[in-house]
Each structure stands twice: as C-alpha cells, then as structure tokens.
Image (cartoon, rainbow, N blue to C red):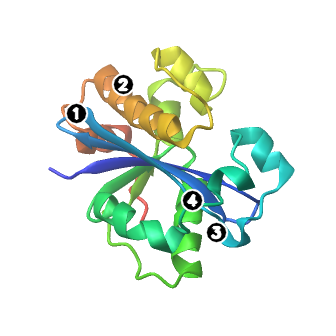
Amino acid sequence: MSRWVAIDFETATREKASACALGIAVIEDNHVVEERAWLIQPPGNIFEPRNIWVHGIDEDMVAQEPEFDEVWVEIEPYLRGATLLAHNAPFDVAVLRSSIARYEIEPLVSHGYHCTVSMARKVWPALANHKLNSVCDHCGIELQHHDAASDAAACARIALAGQRQIGSPTLEELVRQLGLRRHDL
C-alpha cells in the first residue's frame, strides 16, 4: 500500500518559488493520520498585496521563519515515496518544483501526484464548480480557506469522500475506477 500525502502551498508573490506556507495531511489506511504546517520565509521576504489579501500572511509573520531550503529537511521525509494529492495540483506542484529548483535541492522521489479537482469532477459532476470551498461545502468538510494546513486536510478528506462515494477500497482503486492518470513529479 502506498502512502498518500495531500499538500497545499500559499505563495508570497506570483512567482512560484515564493512559498510562504505549506500544509500537509498524511493519509494511511483510509484515514488522515497526521497534519502539519510550516510558515516559510520567501526569498527576500517579499510579498505582493494581492497574495496577503488572499491568505493573510505578511512579511512580519514570517520574518523569523526559515526559508524553504531550511525546512526541506523536515518536509522531505513526509513526501518521499508518497503519492501526492493537491486541489488544483498544477499550482502546488509548480510551487514545489520551483522551490526545489531555486534552492538547488535534489529532486524529490515520489510516486507522482493526483489532482482532487479532477477527482471531484468525476465523482460529483453536477456541482456548479469544483473549487475547494464548493466541494468541501458539498461534502460537509470543515475548511478555513487559504490556511495551508486546513486546505491540505480538506484536500485529503475530499479524496477519501470520493473513495467512499464510489465505493473504492483504496485511493489507488479510486483513481483506477475514475480513469485518472498519475502525473509524474
């Protein structure tokens, strides 16, 4: 059985390598077994007003926090060998890739990733949209939107709700039943 880890990044600017927060939720045996979050000082501690407006994190909140390369030693063991999940995965994977590249960190070895937006579209096609807050509302999942830890936990719970809805015994079987392709990191 593979390990699944839902991730969610918040960024300080429109630059992908500007992570200012990361949340993760670890799924084992069809349950969320651990949630973690980190505040991260982005390069130069530069923020754009729109990003602050979205997530509420600003320069002062991360002034004493480590940069991405310093927290990677804590983050990487969670992600190594796992299948990653993210809601709107292309964004979060781009932040992860860009941050790894910026700090010249050895690439992550994982089992690829899946997007819970794609899952939700197949499991609940009649929803008006498949944004994180909309899917959470439909599934009765608690969410503090744009809080990285809450978003990651919600992403994990969406995948598990989809698994229950379809009647799949595992997340691996869910993606097979839905005909979803795993994306390489």
Marks 3 & 1, CB-CB < 8 Å contact: no
Front position among marks 2 and 3 = 3
Residue type, label 3: Ala
- x, y percent for residue 90: 58, 56
The image shows residue 143, relative to residue 159, as above or below, that is above
- Which is nearer the N-term, disc 2 or disc 4? 4
- Report the disc number at residue 161: 2
Residue type, label 2: Ala
- Which is nearer the N-term, disc 3 or disc 4? 3
Q: Residue at x 61, y 23 (%)?
A: 134
The residues bearing labels 3 and 4 have C-alpha atoms spaced at a distance of 11 Å
The residues bearing labels 1 and 2 have C-alpha atoms spaced at a distance of 10 Å
For disc 4, the marked residue is 40
- Report the disc number at residue 17: 3
The residues bearing labels 2 and 3 have C-alpha atoms spaced at a distance of 31 Å
- How packed mark 2 is, by other alpha carbons closer than 10 Å (few <14, some 14-19, many 20 or more), is some
- Report the disc number at residue 30: 1
- Secondary element at tag 4: loop
- Which is nearer the N-term, disc 3 or disc 1? 3
Q: Tell whether 91 sits left or right of 158.
A: right
Q: Give the image quarter of residue 16.
A: bottom right
Q: Tell whether 8 sits left or right of 111.
A: right
Instruction: Report the residue that reaches farthest toward the right.
Output: 49
